[in-house]
């Protein structure tokens, strides 16, 4: 089977969560099916409507693009599509941003999502891993995830706005990935676009539509236009744009999802607490725990078809996404009860 | 209305076909609805099946990517997914290829699709427009569309293979865009992957799924891997990959579509002949005609809700895509009969 060739080292920890094929190559196929808790993708996804065939057939039009960016502008509080660039996933934006700058010193506030360092390094920049924002003023670019993945650390948006202004004053750039901010609008800088600031959002996590591949940059019109040019024409198909547009405009669904995720997250945290796992932090979409033998716990759970997210650089960390229902919670609780 | 701001010059010819919003900003909304003949997208599209919600929700997996690339490898005759890179539209590949090379002299065989020159120029290369393949050996990169858009010119694949070998021998690259080759497999170099050659294919034209945004590069494994790395992870969503996989594997549909397009194209050509429009060339998906006042004819047809494709650099050219049915053909024929 060719897939096994993709797992070059069967003992290596996965670089990302959410790939059950790779999990199966490692653990075999679980009799009960997988309980995938390895991502921060909401299991309570926005329901994708049936779509007119026409959206698959014709090229996305300027009007489609404008309607999608208009919905994003409204949802993210900038009220003007000129501030928005849409892309096939915020990953595409992570890859484009490094190409828009000359050689830069790039402070990545971590530990955090690995793609920031990877994308800036691959593009030839010098990445400076940093733990806090305190010493970032020597950097040309600062990348921060707010709230942070995987530890849920929050950064004060007022302080980030000040940093963006300071960066802008010397031609620098602050990139704030708000992949997990939908449930915490009070943290978001999206509606505070200003020179030197690029905010990233996506439909992948809160809306549970990671397979949609739709992300946005919110930035001053000049930067947003640069990003749109770099993304190029027709990057987001018509069906994807229409699903995204509907989801972003569905304020009732968004309000209900925020409420539900808060409840589900509290339930998960109680469950993890009863299993004597101490919480490092989290968002309403995932919880990071500190466990003395986290990698062994990952293996133990994996053998039972429960996929958590370990981190190769943090042997005591394990991240859990939200269980989708009572049966899943009971399955996780039983498994954790058998761990010692 | 903001959309009008997108047509910076209402008298400028459209840069691409297929955008009815822009057509409407120019001509108003036609009472009978639009008859869009401005693209080479088949009006007889592959039927998109209803898809499991799960494909919209989870991240596309390594197995999804492999299944899609496997289907493409089979369909394009290389039988090994290592030769395939999948991208969100072949436009994305057009944009990536220039970034993989140091400063190059790039021969673009034209007149042809404008994005080749635009993408290589934007990336800082020097583009040399050329009319034939005869003097391309001074170039580092040659870009050719086979069959060519918009004039349908064919290039002998044996000669292109020789050129690829000659380019490879001095570190050069031949890019063959086969966007319109699905109906003419005898022209394709896809199954003849070799150093120095990148072949581009897509689901947009023959399969009629331009809104899907799915394209492929077929190249030697080392080059295909470079392209996959540049495209980055999760670039093609699960729903899109599944639609593409099914379409590429559907050999009965493909055979029937080839037959149908040949017939429909012959019918279109007869119609254009009866209107005294002389054919420059074409493929089974479009016909290019030579008309003394082609831009005026474009305007005349546009006023009647029939959108053809003019070319700003060729005032005598007008391209027609396939009418979808008898009513559309009659509408076109009546309109052309009133033109003098």
Image (spheres, coloured by chain):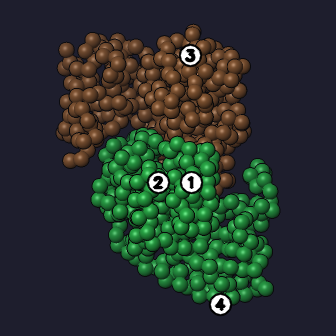
Chain colours: A brown, B green
Viewer-nearest residue: A293 or A107: A107
Label 3 Cα crowd, 10 Å radius (few <14 / some 14-19 / many 20+): some
Q: Which residue is mark 1?
A: B106
Label 2 Cα crowd, 10 Å radius (few <14 / some 14-19 / many 20+): many
Identify the image quadrant of residue A227. Answer: top right
C-alpha distance separating marks 1 and 2: 9 Å
Residue under disc 3 on the same chain as residue under disc 1: no
Q: Which mark is residue B173?
A: 2
Q: Secondary structure at mark 3?
A: loop
C-alpha distance separating marks 3 and 1: 47 Å
C-alpha distance separating marks 2 and 3: 48 Å
Q: Earlier in the sequence, mark 1 or mark 2?
A: 1
Indicate the chain on which mark 4 is placed. Answer: B
Residue A145, given in percent of the width and then of the height, sits at 52, 23
Q: Considering only vertical position in the picture, is B105 above or below B46?
A: above
C-alpha distance separating marks 3 and 4: 70 Å
B294 left or right of A5?
A: right
Label 4 Cα crowd, 10 Å radius (few <14 / some 14-19 / many 20+): few
Q: Which residue is mark 3?
A: A155
Mark 3 or 4: the one toward you: 4
Q: Earlier in the sequence, mark 1 or mark 4?
A: 1
Viewer-nearest residue: B79 or B57: B79
Q: Is residue B71 visible?
A: no
Identify the image quadrant of residue B293. Answer: bottom right
Q: Are marks 1 and 4 in contact (CB under 8 Å)?
A: no
B23 left or right of B107?
A: right
């Amino acid at each position: 089977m060719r897939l096994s060739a993709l797992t070059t080292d069967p003992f290596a920890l996965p670089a990302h969560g959410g790939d059950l094929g790779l999990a199966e190559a490692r653990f075999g196929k679980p009799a009960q099916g997988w309980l995938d808790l390895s991502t921060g993708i909401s299991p309570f996804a926005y329901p994708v409507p049936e779509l007119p065939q026409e959206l698959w057939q014709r090229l996305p039009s300027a009007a489609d693009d404008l309607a999608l960016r208009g919905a994003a502008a409204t949802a993210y509080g900038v009220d003007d599509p000129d501030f928005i660039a849409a892309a096939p996933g915020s990953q595409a934006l992570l890859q484009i941003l490094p190409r828009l700058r000359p050689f830069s010193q790039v402070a990545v506030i971590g530990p955090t999502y690995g793609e920031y360092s990877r994308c800036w390094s691959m593009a030839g920049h010098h990445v400076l891993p940093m733990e806090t924002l305190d010493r970032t003023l020597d950097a040309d670019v600062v990348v921060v995830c707010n709230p942070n993945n995987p530890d849920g650390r929050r950064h004060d948006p007022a302080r980030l706005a000040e940093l963006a202004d300071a960066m802008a004053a010397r031609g620098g750039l602050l990139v704030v990935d708000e992949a997990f901010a939908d449930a915490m609008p009070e943290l978001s800088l999206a509606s505070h676009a200003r020179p030197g600031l690029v905010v990233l959002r996506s439909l992948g996590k809160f809306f549970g539509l990671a397979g949609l591949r739709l992300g946005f940059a919110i930035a001053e019109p000049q930067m947003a236009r640069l990003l749109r040019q770099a993304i190029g024409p027709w990057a987001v198909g018509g069906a994807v744009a229409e699903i995204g547009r509907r989801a972003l405009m569905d304020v009732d669904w968004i309000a209900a999802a925020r409420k539900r995720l808060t409840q589900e997250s509290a339930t998960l945290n109680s469950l993890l607490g009863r299993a004597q796992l101490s919480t490092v932090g989290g968002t309403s979409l995932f919880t990071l725990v500190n466990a003395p033998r986290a990698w062994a716990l990952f293996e133990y759970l994996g053998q039972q078809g429960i996929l958590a997210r370990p981190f190769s650089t943090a042997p005591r960390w394990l991240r859990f996404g939200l269980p989708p229902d009572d049966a899943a919670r009971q399955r996780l609780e039983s498994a954790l009860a058998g761990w010692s």
